[in-house]
Amino acid sequence: MEAMDLLQVLDHQQPRRLRVIENLLRGRRTVSTLYWGQRYHLLPLLDADKHLDRGALTVPAQQLVAANLVTLDSEEDQLLLTPAGQQRQSQVATYYRPQTSGDWLSLDLGAVRQRTLLAVQVTSQYAHSTSRYYPLTTDLATRRIIRQWFHRLKGPQLAETLSVALIQSLQQLPVQTAEAMTDLLTGYQHPGLTVDQVASKQQQTAWEIRLRQRDGLTQIARDARRADHPFHSLLQSLWRSPVTRSAQATLYAVEQGGSLEQVAAQRHVKTNTVKEHLLEAAILSPVAVFPYDQLLPESVRADFATVLNADIDSWQFAQLPEALRARYDFFYFRLYAIWRGRGMMADGTTHN
Amino acid sequence: MEPLTTSLQHVFGFNTFRTGQAAALTALEQGKDTLAILPTGAGKTLIYQLYGYRHPGCVLVISPLLSLMNDQVDRMRINGFRRSAAITSLTSYAERQEILRHLGDYQFLFLSPEMLAQPQMLAQIQRLQLSLLVIDEAHCIVQWGPDFRPEYLLLGAIRTKLQQPLTLMLTATAGETTRQEIAKQLRTRPEIVSESVNRPNIFLDVENVADELEKQARLKRLINQLQRPGVVYFSSKQQATDTALWLHQETGIRAAAYHAGLASEDRFKIQQQFMMGQLDVICATSAFGMGIDKNNVRYVIHYHLPADLESYAQEIGRAGRDGKPSVAILLYAPGDEQLPLALGQSNRPDDETIQRYYARPQQFSEDDPVIQLLAFYRQHGISQVAVTQMFTGRERERNRALAQMMAYARENHCLRERWLAAFDEQSPEHVATCCSPGNTPLDLSALGLIRQQSAVTVAPEREDWVVRLRRLF
Ligand SMILES: [Zn+2]
């Protein structure tokens, strides 16, 4: 991420923590990262830059500060757009706005990317009757899956079917996104461009090109849900619940009844882990699916509602009245904040 | 058993070996450990591929080049050796388990030295029937630099644990000292197969510049004048990246950076673009080179002073593989030797640190690569005295190598003579097409290396993405 990319994920009212943004991009799934990622409306970017170095956002942040576009608190962590920053953010009208981010959490995009790139290369070389070429470097599992896929589908129609399908997918996206996706592909006599090369060609940041690629891949995966799509068997299994398997299992056990301690004993984990699993599930599942009524009964909500105002981000557990802290630990406090933050009003009705 | 040439015909479809290949294979067939010193591009891999084809069991290849090992496996597969796999620290846990489950099925196994140094891995390998042990880039045993792998020093002991299998040591360059050191470390007295390192079609040039600014200007001028494509080597990733960008902006040349910090997909794409002639120049670090079969590289420029003549010989060897006139240019500014000195220094703990570490190892953070190195030695039972001696010895060796490199940069008579003397070789008589040391100006037109300025061509209109995508299929 460069300074201009960082600017796009900041706000003029809500201070946003640099470490949270960094951990989100790096795919660190702690409850704190997920919670604040949701508060910032940035959860789709979870795991979007696995190889980002720790502290890599510090320099861009300092550049924004030097340009008076943001302010940074004394601990060099909380960023807030200045009026000039806010103006700049809205001025950059050409900055790329992803169109498919609603699906990003539900898709293993890294695997979609590897499989799509290798499958396109294999099909392209096959269409030109070449068998000796350097394949893209991928892991063993991807190579095996592509080999099986290719042996099942290869035939005179494959290249044409795939080409039509890809064009159909990319036509639903902005033309520059289709351009970028095409340039990034590898095939016969076409090594493909690197993200940096595409960025320099399109006069955009490398991060924008990556957002475009995420859009392109997600669109292809969406279209591949149809059983007659050539990538159906390749990509269908990469749709997943955003909630990890272990958190799902914990949630299931809790829903079957039993206290958190009982579930912890039954699953051979600490009670604290059970709580973390539940908070993760609460953040990443649709509101209607999570058993709020069981875990956060009306009486608990009422207790919190009496002391907490509507400014959720300002709430601090340490500042709750002592009596309340004695009755409920941090888990309930956080769960209540998630519930409120997802549009539930103090009285249990949904707002807007 | 069928004659070697019959196997060659069978597997590769060639009728004759390149020089060096036959001699190395013959020695191996006679059961002799072999040190093959063959120039880059001489087809060193063919030696163990063919040996593996002719003998049952597994060929175990130890290679220090982590990022390139998967490329090597790909090349094996392209050559029809499908039962090949690589395990490095970059291999995922799942993939590693998968390979280990079928370990006995592989004909060629590539391991990084630190993988082989792990006791569990070694135990697995001990169960295999090894037909041949290959130590690739064997000069790494003695080279001392940022890429130094301490695990290479354990190879002698590991080789003993593997019951001294027949061993092939491969390197592109090794003078007498290096040869002896390799043999000593691996506890063997190998048959030596060597070819001259001399490359008569590569013109050698050293250019003195006053400072960094003049160096940049000279580089830009050279890049504009010289026939393409070419490679410029740097000691730092950042400078390789910045210069590629700068050259492109300043001259419009199609330039890209290549270094070990790139993602594997980017490395793949840039290599392929270069092979297909879509790039005019690569700004590279020493990570670039292996796996590049490009014959028509016309120039190799060194922007920074390499740490020794062996690395220099390896890197300029990428020019002119087609036998046509090519040039190797070293740009030298006063004080350039400070960079390799500093790089070496930063990897070397002083005696006091060694002493403090051995006294209280737990007080040191292993985030520091120097401490990692010490921890490695300590864990392998090497005493403080021995480690101190080793570092001192290495430092002496490194200074000797750098002094040799400097002598080349400062040579006023014949660069080739100076270069070959370092490899204990006699140089042919100096002639006009041999070299131009720092006190002699470079005459590119006499060498026929000036680029024909192509008529200004308007960049072709870029086709619609649909057309481009269709063309893939
Ligand atoms: Zn000469």
Image (cartoon, coloured by chain):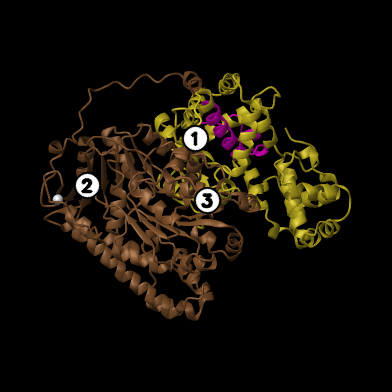
Q: Which residues lie in the magenta part?
A: A95-124
SS type, badge 1 = helix
Q: Which of B398 and B217 is in front in this view?
A: B398
Alpha-carbon span between mark 3 and mark 1? 53 Å
Tell me the colour chain B is drawn in: brown
SS type, badge 3 = loop
- Where residue A155 sits, quadrant-wise, is top right
Residue type at the position of mark 2:
Ile
- Which residue is outermost to the right? A257
Q: How crowded is mark 2: few (under 14 residues within 10 Å), some or many (20 or more)?
A: many
Residue beneath disc 2: B329
Q: Which of B36 and A225 is in front in this view?
A: B36
Please state the horizontal and vertical placement of residue B320, each as a whole percent of the image: 27, 40
Label 2 vs label 1, nearer the camera: 2
Identify the residue shown where x is 88% and y is 54%.
A258
Residue beneath disc 3: B55
- In the image, residue B152 sits, relative to residue B37, either above or below, namely below
Residue type at the position of mark 3:
His
Identify the residue shown where x is 73% and y is 39%.
A343
Please state the horizontal and vertical placement of residue A124, each as a whole percent of the image: 52, 26
Residue beneath disc 1: A208
Tell me the colour chain A is drawn in: yellow
Q: Do labels 2 and 1 share a chain?
A: no
Q: Mark 2 lies on which chain?
A: B
Q: Mark 1 lies on which chain?
A: A
Q: Residues within 10 Å of mark 3 (few under 14, many from 20)?
A: some
Please state the horizontal and vertical placement of residue B369, each as a whole percent of the image: 45, 64
Q: Are marks 3 and 1 on the same chain?
A: no
Q: Are marks 3 and 1 in contact (CB under 8 Å)?
A: no
Q: In terms of secondary structure, what is the magenta stretch mainly? A: helix
Q: Do the residues labelled 3 and 2 touch (CB within 8 Å)?
A: no
Asked whether residue B342 is drawn in magenta, I would say: no
